[in-house]
């Protein structure tokens, strides 16, 4: 029987690319969106799900299980970007970002675990970010939320070993998606002491996304992970220098690495 896959945030960007690729490979794919009616031309079903709403999470998961009788793979892809000086980012927006990028995925995991435990089999792939490996200027909240998901996955994996449920992280670099359109931007304030450096950094971040890699690279990487006998704890997908930056962080003194980041962002 074909494996059943649930992809949160499967209506656009990386999630859509993963879903279409797996669908072509013969998997039974379900995607999710907060507004599924906007995606009537999707190549796979799109269910209504808001990762900040536990009721909608449970409803979508139960719908898949009722229709298919099982759920083999969860891809926690839904997420939100956020930029701005930490000092000027409203507390409500910081909490909202963690609700989407950290607490949301945890609640989706909790919803699928009973079925996977019943099957004594399952795979959970958390889509994080290379940004989660380092505190990036004017993207610190995003880095922190994705980094938290990376770390909790390490703990979760060990807790799930007895149930034959596997979990892994896959951290993308910059990909050509619409993430920049949907993320929260702290406004560029004329009287802000951060106006010039934040403005310059914001332009650089947007340019990186616009020139980003093809999301199909992520789809192919996820396909390999699914077919790996024993998935690793961490995977990184992106340009060489983006992945190499994580290596540099491990081997360079902290202040030297910080200097490299500041030079990169022209700070």
Image: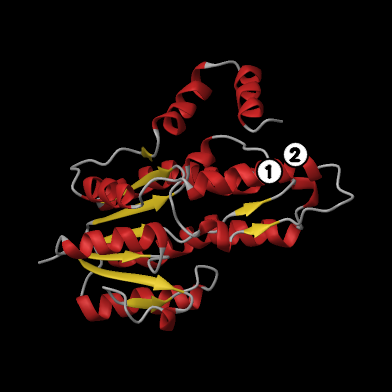
Lateral position of residue 215 relative to residue 252, left or right: left
Q: CA distance from mark 1 to mark 2?
A: 9 Å
User: If you read the primary sequence from the N terminus, does the residue marked by circle 1 or circle 2 appear first?
Assistant: 1
Q: Which residue is mark 1?
A: 138
> Eyeballing the image, is 207 above or below 19?
above
Q: Residue placed at 67% from the left, 41% from the top?
A: 201
Do we see residue 113 in this rendering? Answer: no
Lateral position of residue 249 relative to residue 213, left or right: right
Q: Residue furthest left?
A: 1
From the image, which quarter does the C terminus lie in? top right
Q: Residues within 10 Å of mark 1 (few under 14, many from 20)?
A: many
Do we see residue 266 in this rendering? Answer: yes
Which picture quadrant has residue 241? top left
Q: Residue placed at 32% from the left, 66% from the top?
A: 6
Q: Which residue is mark 2?
A: 197
Q: Position of residue 196 (x, y in %)?
A: 78, 41
Q: Nearer the viewer, residue 80 or 179?
A: 179
Lateral position of residue 70 relative to residue 188, left or right: left
């Amino acid at each position: 029987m074909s494996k059943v896959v649930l992809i949160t945030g499967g209506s656009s960007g990386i999630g859509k690319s993963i879903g279409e690729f797996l669908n072509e490979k013969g998997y039974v794919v379900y995607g999710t969106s907060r507004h599924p009616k906007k995606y009537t031309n999707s190549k796979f079903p799109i269910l209504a799900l808001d990762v900040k709403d536990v009721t909608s999470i449970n409803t979508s998961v139960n719908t898949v299980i009722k229709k298919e009788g099982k759920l083999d793979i969860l891809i926690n892809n839904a997420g939100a970007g956020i930029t701005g000086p930490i000092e000027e980012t409203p507390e409500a927006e910081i909490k909202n970002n963690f609700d989407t990028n950290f607490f949301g995925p945890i609640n989706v995991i909790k919803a699928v675990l009973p079925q996977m435990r019943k099957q004594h089999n399952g795979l959970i792939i958390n889509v994080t970010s290379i940004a989660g490996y380092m505190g990036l200027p004017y993207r610190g909240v995003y880095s922190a939320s994705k980094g938290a998901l990376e770390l909790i996955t390490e703990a979760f994996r060990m807790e799930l070993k007895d149930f034959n449920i596997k979990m892994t992280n896959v951290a993308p670099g910059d990909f050509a998606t619409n993430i920049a359109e949907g993320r929260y931007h702290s406004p560029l304030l004329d009287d802000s002491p951060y106006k010039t450096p934040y403005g310059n950094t914001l332009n650089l971040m947007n340019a990186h996304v616009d020139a980003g890699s093809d999301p199909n690279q992520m789809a192919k990487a996820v396909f390999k992970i699914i077919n790996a006998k024993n998935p690793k704890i961490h995977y990184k997908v992106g340009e060489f220098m983006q992945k190499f930056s994580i290596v540099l962080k491990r081997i360079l003194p902290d202040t030297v690495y910080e200097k490299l980041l500041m030079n990169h962002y022209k700070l």
